[in-house]
Amino acid sequence: AYHQYTPGSGKLSVKGFTTFKISITSSTNITYFSGYDYPGYSGWLTYPILKANFNTPNLASLENSFRIYFPLLESVVFSCTLNYVTSLDNSFYQAVSLKEISFPASLPICTTAEGAFSYINSYANIELPNLPLCTSFNSIFKNSNLNKIIFNSCPSVNDATYMLYSATI
């Protein structure tokens, strides 16, 4: 779904942005979210999203969901299970202002998290959920400035190439 908003018609934030609270609903299950591609647009695009709260238990992938075009994004909360997510690849790649992410306790069938938190510069605390089937953490925190990383159960990871390359923790 694509939405248009009238500048000035939302609520003014303490940072001077016009903000809107958006609820995305569907008569069917939402299985994929991405702000990465916008049809018909060529050029640099910035989505002025500050916070995102999800109650979408049927998501099958978070791959590229908040990639590149979300430099203002500070918080993402999943208030549901994510039992069908198979990939976190590049999900928050260059979400440079991300300070908070709240996952459910486990992503039971997620198999890869390559580049998921690369180029985050906000000194965030990131706690990974249990990832029992995830095999790749390749570049997961590459070039990020983070305060703390908490790894929970990730027994299947066999590729950690560049996992912390040029990262500051």
Image (tube, grey):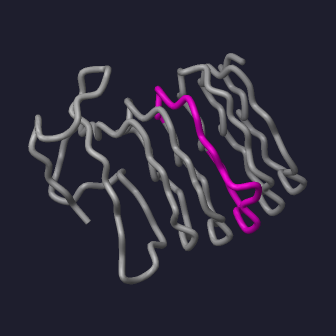
In this image, 157 relative to 116: left or right?
right
Label total for image: 0
Q: Main secondary structure of the magenta part?
A: loop
In the image, residue 28 sits, relative to residue 134, either above or below, namely below
Residue at (47%, 52%) from the top-left corner?
64
Highlighted range, magenta: 94-114
Residue at the extreme top: 168
Whether 131 is among the magenta residues is no
For residue 128, which quarter of the picture?
top right
x, y (%) of residue 6?
9, 44
Q: Residue at x 36, y 51 (%)?
A: 36
Q: Position of residue 33 (x, y in %)?
A: 43, 61
Judging depth in this view, the residue of 140 and 30 nearest the camera is 30
Residue 12 rendering spot, x and y as whole percentages:
23, 29
Q: Is residue 27 above or below residue 157?
A: below
- The image shows residue 2 at horizontal and vertical percentages of 21, 61
Horizontal side of residue 2 vs 75, given as left or right = left
